[in-house]
Image (cartoon, rainbow, N blue to C red):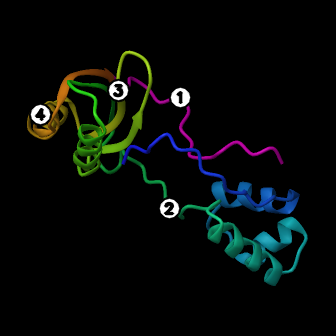
Amino acid sequence: MISDAKTEKFSTPKLDEVDLKLLDLLQTQSNLTTKELAKRVNLSATPVFERIKRLEKNGFIKKYIAVLDADKLDRGLIVFCNITLKQHTKAIGNQFVEEITALKEVTECYNISGDYDFLLKVLVKDMKHYQDFVFNSLGSVSNIGSAHSTFVMGEIKQTHAVPIGV
């Protein structure tokens, strides 16, 4: 949902160098065992396990995923779609977010500033699939004023890693 512009005070736990190293390792090699992680940060397995649980509890680690090959799964056409809404209210924005997150082809959605309101990353099989998506799925989402599509010709860099100063 679109959040209110309220300022909430909360304290973020301080991370030490070992925590940062663990986060960096986990985001690039999440299949490492606790024992392997412990060896890389020069600790025993128990403190590493406890640190990872604390990092999860405090929200530094959102989830663990496997990154799949979209081409091999016949979803190799990447389209960035800029959306402008017809009207701008909290209720309309929340309804748009609810409807757009239900579309399986939309893998990322950002509320952005500038000429457009939202940026979608869409994964489809081919142009025919995208045309069907636009007419039958995106076309059924209420309050869309315009959509502008940009087709990816080649992927140069793709990562889910957050830059960490380790």
Q: Nearer the viewer, mark 1 or mark 4?
A: 4
Q: Earlier in the sequence, mark 3 or mark 1?
A: 3
- Residue at image position (43%, 28%) is 112
Tag 1's secondary structure?
A: loop
Where does the image place residue 61, in percent across and percent down from the top left?
61, 62
Q: Residue furthest right?
A: 42
For badge 1, the amino acid type reads Ile
Mark 1 — residue? Answer: 156
Determine the CA span between mark 2 and mark 4: 30 Å
- Residue at image position (22%, 34%) is 126
Mark 2 — residue? Answer: 65
Q: Earlier in the sequence, mark 2 or mark 1?
A: 2
Determine the CA span between mark 3 and mark 2: 28 Å
Mark 4 — residue? Answer: 139
Tag 2's secondary structure?
A: loop
Nearest the eye: 70 or 137: 137
Mark sitting on residue 117: 3
For badge 2, the amino acid type reads Ile
Identify the image quadrant of residue 129.
Answer: top left
Q: Which residues are magenta?
A: 151-166
Q: Nearer the viewer, mark 3 or mark 1?
A: 3
